[in-house]
Amino acid sequence: MRTIFILVLLGFSFLMRAQDQQILYQHLTEERLGTLRQVLNYRFKGGAGEFERVMNSMVDYTPEARKNCIIGVMIMKFTVSCDNELGDLSLRNPLHYGLNEKVQEFLESTKGMWNTCKDDRYTRFEVPVLFTLEGTETSARGLVTIIGETPGFSCRSDAWYLERFEKFKEKGKSKRALEMLDQLLRRDPYNNSYYDYKRELLGAETTE
């Protein structure tokens, strides 16, 4: 009976901590996206709204990405000099299945769509792009959201991976628990709570 009580208490503590971290994460995400929109309003012709509109008109899901339930935030890191020269493009958290290429093609197509500037502070960009599928729950956010049609079957939600992470962790199956976290990190690479869970799990492994 005592063991059951402890397990319930641990589960409740995990849930409360996750909720607190989620609130903080949402606040930081709004701040980050708000700052990025301000910079794009200044640098991109037509502003952040036009940047989103153009990207949505050019980038969509590939059949392979839909069939494999690929959901996640791809982060475009690039520079646009004050003289409007694009450069230094890299993709953090690439999602593959043809999506990387579509994002690269979009960015290259924006040549000539940028305003000049006089301050190098406005030359570096980190733009999160959320790829998600209709009917699939995820807490991830992006400046731009690309929504694909359902592949004809249900894709797994964030909650599904979190539930299995906790079950594997309780059973001492660290490898499987890490697999669940890696899936969540691919979906939401900005979510620090996932990194905290991973550090705790890896730390527990080294002390056993």
Image (cartoon, helix red, strand yellow):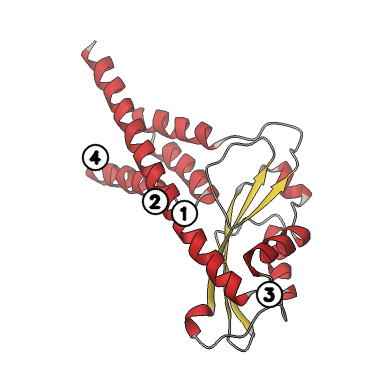
Q: Quick one: SS at disc 3? A: loop
Residue 114 numbered mark, or none: none
How far apart are the alpha carbons under marks 4 and 3?
56 Å
Q: Quickly name the residue at label 3.
A: 45
Question: Residue 126 in the image: x percent, y percent?
Answer: 53, 67
Q: Quickly name the residue at label 1.
A: 29
Residue drawn 42% across the image and 50% down it: 27
Q: Quickly name the residue at label 2.
A: 192
Pointers 2 and 1 in contact (CB under 8 A)? no
Front residue (pair 199, 20): 20
Type of amino acid at the residue the image marks with label 1: Thr
Which quadrant holds the C terminus?
top left
Number of other residues with Cα within 10 Å of mark 4, as a class: few under 14, some 14 to 19, many 20 or more: few
Pointers 2 and 4 in contact (CB under 8 A)? no
Q: Is residue 89 visible?
A: no
Reading the chain from its start, which is encountered first: label 1 or label 3?
1
Reading the chain from its start, which is encountered first: label 2 or label 1?
1
Q: Quickly name the residue at label 4.
A: 208
Reading the chain from its start, which is encountered first: label 2 or label 4?
2
